[in-house]
Amino acid sequence: MTIVIGYIPTKQGEAALTAGIEQARAHGDRVLVVNMARDDKLVDAHRAPSSELDRLDRDLAESGVAHEVRRIEHGTDPAEALIDVAGEVDARLVVIGLRHRTAVGKLLLGSTAQRVLLDAPCPVLAVKPR
Amino acid sequence: MDNLNNLIEGFGHILTPINLLYAFVGVTVGTAVGVLPGIGPAMTLALLLPITFGLDPTQAMILFCGVFYGGMYGGSTTSILLNTPGESSSVVTALEGNKMAKAGRAAQALATAAIGSFVAGTIATLLLAFVMPQVVAFAIKLGSPDYLAIIMLAFVGAAAVLGSSRIRGFASLLIGLAIGIVGIDRVTGQQRMTFDLPQLADGIDIVVVAVGLFAVGEALWVAAHLRRKAGSVIPVGKPWMGREDWRRSWKPWLRGTALGFPFGAIPAGGAEVPTFLSYVTERKLTKHPEEFGKGAIEGVAGPEAANNASAAGTLVPLLAIGLPTNATAAIMLSALQGWGLDPGPLLIEKQPVLVWTLVASLFVGNTMLLLLNLPLAPAWAKLLQIPRPYLYAGILFFAAMGAWTVNGQAFDLYLLLAIGLLGFAIRRFGFPVLPLIIGVILAPIAELHLRRSLQLSHGDLSGLVGGPVSWVCYAVIAVAILWPLIARLIRTAGGNGGPGSGPGQHTTISTEASA
């Protein structure tokens, strides 16, 4: 089975990555690391630089986990992209990082994590950075 | 000495809290729109026009010039960090600036751009203060035929010298002139091109044209090209320069200033040509030719100084003879007309407080810009993370509101949409915007001078050629129009095609810049 990890170059993203790989090791799963960059922004802070994705790919190969690193550069909604990928590969688990959002912040900008939690076709593991 | 006294008096007027506030708002907004590609000072001024008609002209002009100067600063940030010029005047900066950023020297590139802009802006504004009164003294003796010739020169310069294609340039100019003459003929009282619509009898308001062209046209254009891969954030750090960077930067700053100021002041000069010339000069003069193409600091310092100097240069003909040489200046001119001020040589005599406070505000604004941009460049770069739909929704909202406030009639909104579609079409088919907007704004003035000259000579065409000024202008126009032919003759006759290289390069660079 496949574990889909929503990765962004922040400590939340790193936490999700660590937790996802742990899960994959424990149950012998394949991991699919997804990085999404919105195409309606000129610069997206959540876009992982190519060098970072390459490094990720190498690290995963060294650790011996079956893996794939995928970059999505179209669309405007990371939650939707993650859910689509999860459905496409029939994922066993989706792993995301959480950060604290105020009620007002959620009202104004919405919460990607919340939408993934509610709409994902499979169980979701949400982790907080330590 | 008189100029200096006037300038000091201007400083006295600018140093009031409310004027300083307008200058600060202007430079802040200017930097923001400069950073954002596609949104420039021209569009911003168009959107601000309806609001500022209610303001005191001096304060509104301080605001406008702040936006204009700020745009020149902000454009470099995007060029350097994203390799997408924030403004057409920063196209050249991207060549070396982005290479520097990729090599981890973004901080130095941003610093040399900001400090260079400050140095150039200050020197050029000082030049403005001393040159403008001389130009006024000269222009005050000019008659209608001379004015007509100068305006014709501006038309031809905008249409034929800049841009990729002369045909497109002239087509664009003619569209502008056609829009400009809609309404009642001021001499005979006849209605022209109004299609019997009473709403058109007063002509098409410049706010509707400018907002439609710059804001709605650009929004439609972006909507048609919305999908585009995002870039990653480039870590910047605090902009600073080492001793070596200073040593390599100060000469390009001064040379850039020397190139930028005169080009800003001549019709159809703009900021694109001098920035490119400055880049070429620096590449030729550098002691580190191996670094060019890989991130040479001279290639950022020179062009960034040149574009700020040209901004100050642009204000010379605008304030001295009422002649705009770029789109932003064209909108400032229409603002001056909107307040009932008569832009021209008499402006400085009738409104000395406005003119000199404005000049003083440029010094103040320039200093504010250095303080805003040098430590805060990384913060400005965050603006690039705003999703475009949010931005353009806001722009369209302000555009529609602006068009509505002109006369409070729905007809202007339809007109806005129609002109917006025109703006989209000229972008789609590669027509330059500058000749169009200059055509719209100068058409009534050109017509006034044309008919006045003809009335003086009782319809004799020789009355159009008044004095030496018009002789020179028409000669330059002839050369500009016949240049392709002349260049070919020179090449076939001489063979050593040295002189042909200059204008050829202009064309290449302004092709990119016209978008």
Image (cartoon, coloured by chain):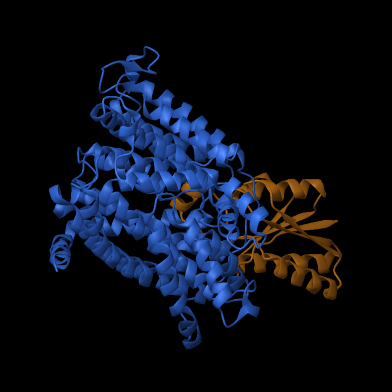
Task: Give x and y (percent) for residue B145.
Answer: 30, 38
Residue lying at 57% horizontally and 55% vertically, measured from the top left: B509
Query: Can you tell which chain is drawn orange?
Result: A
Q: Is residue A32 above or below residue B396?
A: below
From this view, report whether residue B499 is shown above or below residue B282: above
Q: Residue furthest front?
A: B493
- Who is closer to the viewer here, A23 or B253? B253
The residue drawn where x is 30% and y is 42% is B146
Query: Residue B24 falls in which quadrant of the image?
Result: bottom left
Placement of the N terminus of chain B among the 4 image quadrants:
bottom left
Chain B pictured colour: blue
Query: In the image, is B401 to the left or to the right of B218?
Result: left
Q: Looking at the image, which is closer to me, B487 or B61? A: B487
Instruction: Name the residue furthest bottom.
Output: B243
Question: Which residue is at 35% across, 29% downward?
Answer: B461
Residue sitting nearer the eye, B261 or B16: B261
**Residue B427 appearing in the image:** yes
Q: Report the number of discs.
A: 0
Q: Nearer the viewer, residue A13 or B35?
A: B35
Q: Residue at x 44, y 49 (%)?
A: B268
Relative horizontal placement of residue B481, taking residue A84 as reference (left or right): left
List x then y, in percent, for residue B342: 21, 41
Q: Is residue B47 left or right of residue B89?
A: left
Residue B204: image x %, image y %?
35, 27
Image spot of residue A38 (x, y percent): 62, 51
The picture quadrant where one finds residue B258 is bottom left
Query: Is residue B43 visible to the viewer in this orientation of the structure?
Result: no
